[in-house]
Each structure stands twice: as C-alpha cells, then as structure tokens.
Amino acid sequence: MSTLKAVRGTRDLLPPETALWNRIEATARDVFARYNFGEIRTPVFEDTGLFARGVGEETDIVSKEMYTWEDRARAQSEKTQSLTLRPENTAGVVRAYIEHGLGESGLLQKLYYIGPQFRRERPQKGRYRQFSQIGAEVIGPPSAGSESPLRDAEVLEMLATLLDELGITGWVLELNSVGSAADRARYNEALREALIPVVGQMCGDCQRRAETNPLRVLDCKVAADQPIIETLPVIADSLDEASGAHFAAVTAALDAAGVPYTRNHRLVRGLDYYTRTTFEFTHGGLGAQNALLGGGRYDGLSEMLGGPRAPGIGFAIGEDRLVLTLLAALDQKAAPPQVADAFIAPLGEGMNAAALVLARELRHQGLWIELGEGSFRLKKSFEAADKTARQIVILGEDELQSGILTVKNFSTGVQTKVPRGELAVFLSN
Ligand code: AMP
C-alpha cells in the first residue's frame, strides 16, 4: 500500500519551528494592540462570488488559482452553492464589515487577522498552496477619517515597527500610487497606446494583457520584455491633483517619522481593488519570491461588494516568508530546539505516580518539565534527559522519604542535593 503524504504545496509545521511561528504571531499581536487594532476571524471558505467581485475576475488568483467546489444541496429545498477556500482575507473582512454594519458606529474599524489562505500556485521556495498571512485593515466611513493619507502613513510606520521588532533587517519598502479609478483608466489608455507599436515583440501573456488589462503588463517577469517595459509611460504622470497630493502627504509623513522607502513605478499589484497607495516590503534574502508583504488602499471595495462607502487601507504579510527570513538570519535551517528546565527520572515503575505529583508541583510553579518513565534504566533516563532538558532530577524511594532530591546539571556536570521545598527555585536558576 502506498504511504499517504501531505498534498503538494502544503506542509506540516513541526516543533521547534512552530515556536518561531508562535513568537512571530505574539509579536504581531503585541504591536497591533499598541496601534489599537482588534482581531477579526472570518471563515476559511466563502461564497465564490465574494472573490469574483472583491478580488476581480481578471486576476490570476480568481481566474486560475482558487480552490472552488459546488456544495451539494442537503435537501430538495436547498440550492447548491459555489464555495471557495479563501485565497486572501481582505474580501472576507470587508464582507464582515458590511454584514455587521460596522461602519454604523461612525468610528474607524482597525482589524487584524492571522490565518491560512489557499491558492493553487506552482509550489516553490516561499510559495505554497496553503500559506499563512498576518494582515490588517483600516476601514470606515469617510467621516471617520478613513481617506486620510495619515492612515496610510501610520500603517506603513506600524509595519516598519513590526519588522524591526521581529528582528528582520534589510527590508525595503517599495511604494507607489495607482491613483483613483479614473486615473487608472487614463493610465490604462496611455499604456494601451504605447503598447501598440511594441507589443508584437513581447511574450504571449503581454500580448493578451495589452488587450484585456494593460496595467498587468508591468507585472511581466520575462527577461526579454523588460527593456520594452522600461520605456512605457509611468502611472505617476497620469495621477490627478488629489491623488498626487495624497501621495505627497503619505511620503511627507513617512519622511517625518524616518521610515525609509523607494518609489517603484511598476508596483501595481495583482489585485483589481487597489486605489492610490500601493506598497510591498521586499527582502533580498528570499530569492525569486522576494515579497515579504503587500498592501494598499482600496477605496471602492466596499461599494463593489454592495456595501456603503468605506475607504480603507490594508496589508497582508506572508508569514511563511517571515519564518524563512528569520531562519536565514539565524544562519541555520531549523529553529533552536526547545529544552525543558528539568527531566524527572522515577527510579522504578513504583515511583511513576510520585514523579507525576512532583512534575505537577513544579509545572504549577512555572517550570518546563519533561517527565521520564520508571521502567527506564538510569542510564537510559540520563540519555533521554540530556537531549530534552538542562537538568535531571532523580526520584527514588529514598528521595521520596527524605525529601532531599538529587539534581544533576548537564552543562556544569555538577550534582547537588536539594530539599524538595527549594527545588523549583534551584531548577529555575
Ligand atoms: P497578496 O495577498 O498576493 O498581496 O500577498 C501578500 C503576501 O502574502 C505576499 O507578499 C507574500 O509574502 C504572501 N504570499 C502570497 N502568496 C503566497 C504563497 N502562495 N505562498 C506563500 N506566501 C504567499
């Protein structure tokens, strides 16, 4: 019988690496709390229509990467429904914002999420079919200040803080503006015209995009097309006065806060709903998939999903890529193994219950304890303890009666007799 394996593009996360994942998530929660964000958890699957409308039929995500199925009707009266594993979380958050009337408070909604997303992409290093994103959205009625460039700058400054606190150095913030829907339409026209004389020399994808969505030509990775793309007009020249002023205000606030960025005129992002500010944080250590995170402003998304006017800005961090970056910085393939404070070795199976009681006492006092097994010979207990803990505590009939325990420290090799009442303090030093 063939053995079963995790599906292509998915993987198991095991200790000790999961400790690193938990540390990243704890740091993110801590930073988000300081910026007054609250957590939202939306379902992992949604009606397919949400993504078709909220991400865009033309995007690679919707046109070829979604895990979609027709949910069977359970009763004659029920209709089947097309469902999709979420490929991203912004559409779900905005759906929830509309469904729960969160805008009615008149306040800015500041929401973050952490969770799995699903895209049928070609797996490679840093690109998986199930991956985890840490993201946040700032969304609300215009009266709450949701359109202000200060919101964009604050989100970017928060991301710089988060990456710094995670210990990720060498990130680059690439920034651009894709303008309003009208600016984009104007730019698309300018691109379409500029492409007419040159598109014949470009790749098949670009030839198709030049017809359907010229903006996407800027995403092209084919080396031979790059010199041609360099000559195309930039979107900065198509921005109207308001979009230009918005971008200038964002960069002025970033300059004031000392957050470095570079302008990337080609940064138009893969999703259709972006307006004005778009950004990516990249990291050289990641190789081909060098984007740590991406995001931008999406002022028309709520209306696109049938909701009230609710401008917003958000981002999604690729958590898998944070882990890869941190592991590379640690200069090792795996996170350091987790080591307990002490290993308790019962001498004989008759001591097992007493060992459980001792372990319980110490764990209640906050120590990390590995519990051995009385059927082990002492040598085997020492070998197991040496691999999992800093110290070993031997518990036999004599120790139980006298209340004096023998502790051996593996790094110093020193063996000490310690009264049971002082054990927790001794072990934690
Ligand atoms: P997006 O939702 O496409 O804007 O992506 C935001 C971030 O999620 C990217 O910058 C990546 O870090 C991460 N990401 C996107 N797709 C994948 C994937 N298939 N595997 C791992 N990380 C991904």
Image: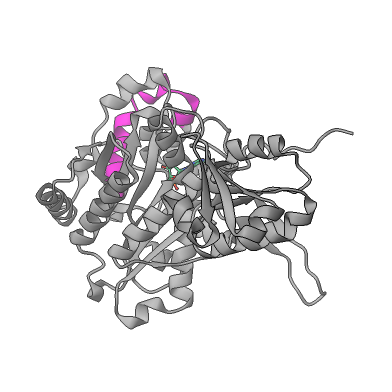
Which percent across, then down, holds residue 250?
17, 53
Residue 21 drawn above or below residue 216: below
Q: Residue furthest bottom?
A: 105
Which percent across, then down, holds residue 202?
42, 22
Q: 423 or 47: which is nearer to us?
A: 423
Q: 418 or 154: which is nearer to us?
A: 418
Camera sees residue 192? no
Q: 136 or 68: which is nearer to us?
A: 136
Q: Would residue 187 be found to the left or right of residue 382 on screen?
A: left
Q: Would residue 136 be found to the left or right of residue 169 on screen?
A: right
Give residue 32's quadrant in the image.
Answer: bottom left
Quadrant where the image shows the N terminus: top right
Residue at left offset 78%, top offset 77%: 77
Camera sees residue 203? yes
Q: Would residue 66 be found to the left or right of residue 424 on screen?
A: right
Which percent across, then down, holds residue 243?
19, 54
Give residue 113's quadrant in the image.
Answer: bottom left
Classified by dominant secondary structure, the portion drawn in magenta counts as: helix
> What segment is highlighted magenta in the picture?
184-207
Is 185 one of the magenta-colored residues? yes
Which percent across, then down, holds residue 307?
42, 72
Residue at left offset 36%, top offset 77%: 103
In this figure, which colouring scheme has been used for the structure?
Answer: one colour
Q: 212 or 352: which is nearer to us?
A: 352
Q: How many marks?
A: 0
Is 327 one of the magenta-colored residues? no
Residue at left offset 39%, top offset 59%: 29
